[in-house]
Image (cartoon, coloured by chain):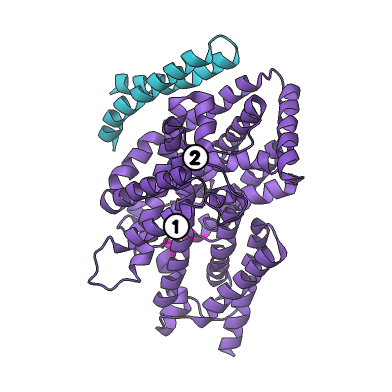
Amino acid sequence: MKILKLISALSIVGFILLTSILLLLGSMNAANMKILMLIGTILWFLVTPLWMKEES
Amino acid sequence: MAESQNAAVITNENAGGEFERTPVPSSKLKGWKSFLGMYAGEHAAGTEFMIGPLFLAAGASLKDLALGLLLGNILAILTWRYLVAPIAVSSKLTLYYQLEKIAGKNLVKIYNVVNGVLFCFLAGAMITVSASAVGIPFDINFSIPENIFGLSTPAFSMIVIIVGVVMTVVAAAGYNTVSKFANIAAPWMIVVFAACGLSALSQMEVDSWESLLVEWDKGISVVQSVNGKTDFGFWKIVIFSWLCNAAMHFGMADLTIMRFAKDSRAGWGPSIGMFLGHYMAWICASFMLAAQIKLTGDISANPGALAWSAVGWTGIICVIVAGWTTANPTIYRAGLAFQTLFPLKSKKYSGVILAGIVATAAGIFPSLSGKLLDFVGLYGAILGPMGGVIFVNHYLAKKMNFTQDYADEKGTGFNTGVLLAWLIPVALGLYFIFGQGLFPAYAVIPSWIASSVLYVVIMKLQKS
């Protein structure tokens, strides 16, 4: 359960929020950011229902 | 915003099937921190994609926006805390039951249908928002016609119809599934909103507050060179952000939620959600339009195109999900309100289908989503005044020596006093809004006060 929550957090903080910060700082280009964000989105919707269902 | 508005339809369904006609027992009460979490995702909805860019399009300066939203949101939170929460904690009743005790069963039905119609327009705007994103992969964009009953392209209208039909069928068949999905999507949506804003800042190539102000002002100049000079100043922003959820706080719709609170501190519950949805999300969404204007010169606030440009497919998915998770419960609850119009023998989803048809028809006219700032104010101006009646009934009835919970006490199904106290201020408000061009949010508080005073006067006259 903890690992699943960690993956969920990583998927939105790492793959979505951090990549957009890196884009703003000029450390990443827009194309790579968009791909990583999509990966983060897919991860979020694959993993989050697993632990959220358990909790509810 | 819109998620919270869903709570306004005061049907038994809102009560979650629990304690609909009795006060919530103390064993079921929750601490105030539970309300922080519960409200956190509620104010980051599909409407945010539409409202944020409209501030820029309306000519609001960035400084006014940042400070005006701050003050307006604080005022909204204080209204929940000091107006709604004390009554909710004291009575522990749903708005439905509380109004029924004051106004009578039949008048509550009328109120519900009015609420349902307004919901349909809100859902219609959300269908337009989702359709704007669905159209992007097919290269179908929508433009907002000048005429309020003007249509967009036939291809876009067709997408709206398809999206509307899908949402209606899902609302009629699987409301709970979408509700669970909305809970899963909420944290992701908030982060995507922030990412959209950061990406838009990068698109604008800003590296300081000053350079951001320059780009923002350039965006306003471009918009005003096309649309003409408009003004959306500090106080207008304050009033709008304070009262865009007026139906929930001044209108007391959130009594239904806050009746589960142990104490009045639950009124602080919306604070995190408000600042995520009605501050961060609106500002981020407005940056997307500023970036689009810089990159392409296009001033149209098309949520799908804005999100696609900022974060690609994630943005498209976010706009569809945000629109869908807002429109779905809205159609469902509008349907419940309409269900009272159908004979008892009719199918239980008849109301939802009717609501879906009305919402889809509304969604075909993109001007509705383009007028969301006005519509949200109008929503509060129509439903808010009923909260004044509840306020008077709760605090003043005994002190001023007239009957508390009149309909309940007298056994009537229709309290004409409540009808007049609600309709007269609303009719006057509508006259000023449509006849004199008043910004709808400005009508909320005067209508609320007028409704409260009128109810006192009518009840005193009735007694004498």
**Depicted B445 relative to depicted B217: above or below:** below
Q: Choose the circle earlier in sequence order: 1 or 2.
A: 2
Which residue sits at x=54%, y=80%?
B417
Q: Quadrant of residue B344?
A: bottom left
Q: Does the rendering let one see residue B431?
A: yes
Residue at image position (27%, 48%) is B174
Identify the residue at image location x=69%, y=67%: B435
**Position in image of residue A44 (x %, y %):** 36, 25
Q: Main secondary structure of the magenta part?
A: helix
Q: Which residues are magenta?
A: B87-95
Provide the chain ID for the residue under circle 1: B
Quadrant of res B339: bottom left
Badge 1 amino acid:
Cys
Mark nearest the camera among 1 and 2 is 1
Decide: marks 1, 2 in contact (CB < 8 A)?
no
Residue ID for mark 2: B44
Residue B156: percent from left, percent from top: 46, 43
- Judge whether residue B89 is colored magenta: yes
Q: Evaluate whether residue B33 shows in this view.
A: no
Q: Chain B is which colour?
A: purple
Kind of residue sitting beneath label 2: Ala
Q: Which chain is cyan in the picture? A: A
Q: Secondary structure at mark 1?
A: helix
Between B418 and B435, the one lying in front of the other is B435
Q: Toward the viewer: B123 or B419?
A: B123
Tell me the tag on residue B120: 1
The alpha-carbon separation of the residues under discs 1 and 2 comes to 19 Å
Question: Quarter holding the C terminus of chain B?
Answer: bottom right
* Residue B9 position by quadrant: bottom left
Q: Is residue B178 above or below residue B110?
A: above
